[in-house]
Amino acid sequence: MADQEIRKRLDRKELELNALLEITQAINSNVPEASLYKIFHFTLRSNLNIKKLALYVFDEQWNCQVNFGTKNNFSKLQLDDRFHLTRQPHKMTDFEQECEFHEFDMLIPVAHENTTLAVVFVGGLDDNPQDAVRFIQALSNIIIVAIENKKLARKQLEQEAFRKELEIASDVQQFLFPEKLPNTERLKLEASYLPHDLVGGDYYDFIPINKNQFLLCVADVSGKGIPAALMMSNFQASLRTLLRQMPNLTEIVEALNYQVLENAKGEKFITFFAAIYDINLKTLVYVNSGHNPPLLYDKKHGVRLLEDGSTVLGAMHPLPFLKEGFITDLDDFLLFCYTDGLTETLNEKGEEYGQQALIDYFTENNQKELKTIHQDIIVRLDGFKGKNSYRDDITMLSCRVS
């Protein structure tokens, strides 16, 4: 009788070793997660004669991955969060509250680095339950850790793919900006772009129309990341195409609005400011489509806000109350355009930097070099925000005609 018992235990140990070898080979062969669960199921049910089992794995929530031999369908039953705290095997009789899981004899947790990754409910164990529990725990640990490694590798691949997409989108966005801005005695432009992330939703441009006229603009698309960069790329291409086809700024804005609405289906919109200056006629024509009003400074009028225009692009068609701004006798001036990331910068008290701070600055410092003006504003913003981080992209575009 003793020999038979020893032989029985040896046979069982051989089955367990073969099962561990099989699962190790499967892991080394990089089989899918579903196949690992099938091996787990077959090994415990057929080879080791486990009567009933439910394996729950945590992936944002508890999911039953293996279930057999039970009255209840545990694939439809959820676990509560207390099982995150389970670190040692328990008899189900240790749990006072009666529930469907009392159909099982034991609860066996699978923990890794102080985190419970899975729990195994088993019932109908043979006359050596301690040996069975140890083996189930060993087999479950091997499989669950292998699956966790697969998840980690998959996340790393996804993150790498996303990083490459962001790099591509960042390159696309850089192509939107002018490679070189004019810097002559008569005309000077300066631009600063401070992205909040690798890819933002701001855009600025300078487009010569003929020897006497040029267009400058600044825009901000709702949202960030790759969709915003692609949307701005399409917007820039449309603007440049329309500018070649029609010289009328109002018609250009109407056409841009229609295209944004068609492309974004009302889910995104663009704030946009565009101005055309004629050096010979000394006139500035502009449209402000829901954008932060640029600051125009000249000696005769001081600082003016350029607010005439319409609502944001892409919200409705046709644009309501579209009005073109028109300024004459404008010969010696400074125009400063920016996006809302500048004025909406918060300090540690939750206060915004605001438009008035810009007006006050330009009232006193309008004669400085454009590069110095941009540097001054950035320094002031850094001091204003304190320990707060920037919440949005910041774009500044300055133009001086003298």
Image (tube, rainbow, N blue to C red):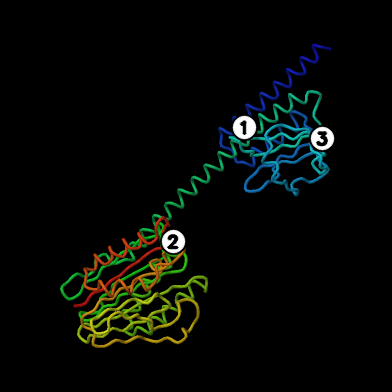
N-terminal of the two: label 3 or label 1?
3
* Residue 271 vertical position relative to residue 347 in the rendered view, above or below: below
Q: Position of residue 108 (x, y in %)?
A: 71, 34
Amino acid at pointer 1: Ile
Q: Position of residue 286 (x, y in %)?
A: 33, 82
Helix, strand or loop status at disc 3? helix
* Residue 320 vertical position relative to residue 230 in the rendered view, above or below: below
Of labels 2 and 1, the one closer to you: 2
Pick the front one: 211 or 309: 309
Does residue 328 appear to the left or right of 356 in the view shown? left
Pick the front one: 352 or 196: 352
How far is the residue under mark 3 from the one under mark 1? 27 Å
Label number found at residue 142: 1
N-terminal of the two: label 3 or label 2?
3
Q: Quadrant of residue 271?
A: bottom left
Amino acid at pointer 2: Arg
Of labels 3 and 2, the one closer to you: 2
Q: Position of residue 74 (x, y in %)?
A: 76, 45
Q: Which residue is mark 2?
A: 391
Q: Which residue is mark 3?
A: 93
Residue at the (36%, 75%) spot, across then down: 239
Q: Within 10 angstroms of label 1, few (less than 14), some, or many (20 or more) residues?
A: some
